[in-house]
Image (cartoon, rainbow, N blue to C red):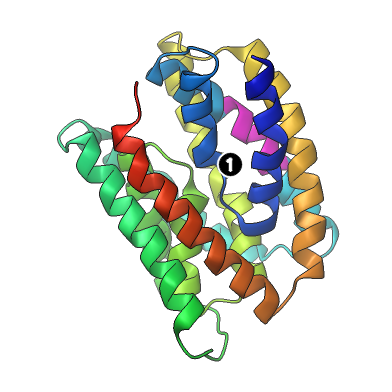
Amino acid sequence: MLGVLLVALPVGVCIGTVGIGGVLLPPALTGLAGLDIHAAAGTSSWCFLFTGLVGTLGYARHQAMPWRFGGLLTLGAAPAAAAGALVNGLVPATALWLVLAVVTAGSGGYNLWARPREARELPAAAAVGVGAAVGFGSALTGTGGPVLLVPVLLALGVPALTTIAAGQLIQLPLVGFATLGYAAQGSVHFGLGTALGVLAGAGTFLGTRLARRLRGQHLHRVASAALVGFGGFLFTLPFLPR
């Protein structure tokens, strides 16, 4: 249990800095705390409510939260997540994780080696469409929104700080509904999830401060390198003991 608590802080730092990192927590809960896969996912979802709130407030406090853009993404993500959850049981889990790994690592590699492009924001309709794709894919794979949102938006040329801040906001409805679903099945350890959430939330606070210091191309490259690393980790997930 101590090992899981020690993992929470760096997970939070990753979430606050590059928008992703939460994917590390469920395997830690199964491998170190002995939770089954459903309890690990449910407890992680509760924990991510803390990181999402801290990250959203942290970026908002410094006028770095793209409220309109994030709202459009969320508008598309919320209903699409319900459809993704329905399809989840029809697709083999291994295939889902491998596709997610390819998207994550591929986007990171592309953004690291491609020539820098002029940063831009998406039109409203495109933002809703991206949100719908992310919401569907997140529910389909059982991950939080930023795991898919960050690689997609960076590949589309959206500024890194805008991408990471929007990822904090979009995860709130996704993990909120996920927590309700897992709680109805008795798969949320609220005590452990709260302890993890407090520690991960502290890490997220530190991560938001670091991200603001790495604005522009530096943050873009850090986020892209992180995507490659997390993509490599995702390749191993289907083969870890459950």
Q: Main secondary structure of the magenta part?
A: helix
Q: Is residue 207 visible?
A: yes
- 102 lies left or right of 166: left
Q: Position of residue 178 (x, y in %)?
A: 46, 29
| Amino acid at the residue labelled 1 | Leu
Q: Is residue 45 above or below residue 135?
A: above
Q: Is residue 185 magenta?
A: no
Q: Position of residue 176 (x, y in %)?
A: 54, 32
How many neighbours does mark 1 have within 10 angstroms: few (below 14), some (14-19), or many (20 or more)? Answer: many
- Dot 1: what SS? helix
Q: Residue at x 63, y 34 (%)?
A: 49
Q: Which residues are magenta?
A: 46-53
Residue nearer the viewer, 57 or 14: 14
Residue nearer the viewer, 116 or 152: 116
| Disc 1 target residue | 172
Q: Is residue 142 above or below residue 217?
A: above
- 95 lies left or right of 219: left
Q: Is residue 176 above or below residue 105?
A: above
